[in-house]
Amino acid sequence: MEFIVDNKIQEIDTIIDALFVNANMEELERTYNHYNLRLLPNEKDFLKEIESKVDKEKLNYFFKEYGGEVSIAKAMYSTKTLYGKTLEESLDFIRDEENSKILESLVADMLFLKFGDRSIVRQKLIKKSVDKHYALEVLEESSIEPHLKWHIYMFINHIEEKKREFCSFIEAIYMEAKESIDRLLRESKKWSNDIKRSIEEEGLEYIKNTFKNIDIDDKAYDKVYIYVKALLSYNFQYVGYTGERELYIGFGVNYEKVLSTLWGRDTFQWFEVVAKCIADKEKFEIIKILSEEENYSLELSNRLGIATSDISNQIKNLGLSNLLIETKRNNKYYYSLNKDSLRSWIEVLIETLKL
């Protein structure tokens, strides 16, 4: 397995993160509050600066998310397509990307919002020619709010124009905030070099020890691409492409610190986060089901009568609380209860209260 650490993507990743956060601040605040996390002062200042410079109408048009899955911006790129590219190279890629591929990406996200399972989405698209008419049909059948449907409708009918508008929008923000972006990138450079050194010395063991909340199958991937997120220092994201045998991982400079706090047996924060999960009705229902057998998100959605987008959010929170074990099998992500972690939490409760 080969490991590649390349942070050229940081320029556009930092801008995109800032724009997504400003367009969906309530979602970030809800997630951070659940874990008692707070944006760092330099992150707050940078986000406020971006907010003060951005065209709010364009911001919401491109970056407002529905169900945590669908946004117009996401249809135009992926971590895979932008990895190893500078800002200028990334925007050139988006300008030149085939409209049919952008349309297919948008349709795939809308279908995932409906079914909550990427394998089902792939099956539906494998022999399907995705054109404008099919995209509009999927949009019409979706549960997306009417005003966001209108945004997507306009995008589907004017992709070329909207691509150019998007790239110009990103370029303008970059020029306005270049000094602050460069400062964030400088601050993350030392840590990025430390990560590269650790990976060179420890390889897969470092990855597995750092990202304990995902099951990384070393037989499924030939290459692992890693980058440091200069903004949102607590965040972590990964995406695997089993067909190409590639895994992409991006994480913030404080991600390891957060995990040691959230998952540390002796910390009150870890105890409180797990207690919040158990006290939440939907999360508790998921915990009960997964204590008996593993399930994937669509199964949970059907069993509980909860929208797949809501299931995805609950799964994310339970995973960060170290209450889930995630395993990828046959292109599906299966979840089971991390019984060892829950037993440890119960032991702390018994010891603390001398029960």
Image (cartoon, rainbow, N blue to C red):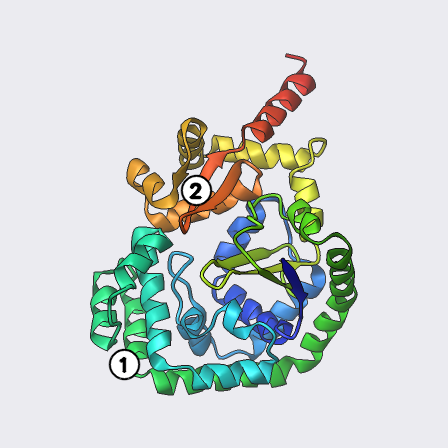
Q: Which mark is residue 157?
A: 1
Q: Residue at x 59, y 44 (%)?
A: 35
Could you give the CA–CA distance between mark 1 and mark 2, rounded to whole angstroms? 37 Å
| Residue 350 can be seen in this image | yes
Name the amino acid type tagged 1: Asn
Q: Residue at x 28, y 68 (%)?
A: 149
Viewer-side residue, 228 vs 221: 221
Above or below: residue 214 compared with residue 14: above
Give the quadrant of residue 48: bottom right
Dot 2 crowding, Cα within 10 Å, few <14, some 14–19, many 20+: some
Viewer-side residue, 162 vs 205: 205
**Residue 337 falls left or right of residue 352:** left
Q: Which mark is residue 221?
A: none
**Residue 201 falls left or right of residue 226:** right
Residue on which disc 2 sits: 334
Q: Residue at x 58, y 38 (%)?
A: 322
Could you say whether the residue bearing mark 1 is in a helix, strand or loop?
A: helix
Name the amino acid type tagged 2: Tyr
Q: Quadrant of the N terminus?
A: bottom right
Dot 1 crowding, Cα within 10 Å, few <14, some 14–19, many 20+: some
**Residue 26 falls left or right of residue 256:** left
Viewer-side residue, 50 vs 142: 142
Q: Quadrant of the C terminus?
A: top right
Q: Residue 132: x percent and y percent?
A: 24, 76
**Residue 178 falls left or right of residue 160:** right
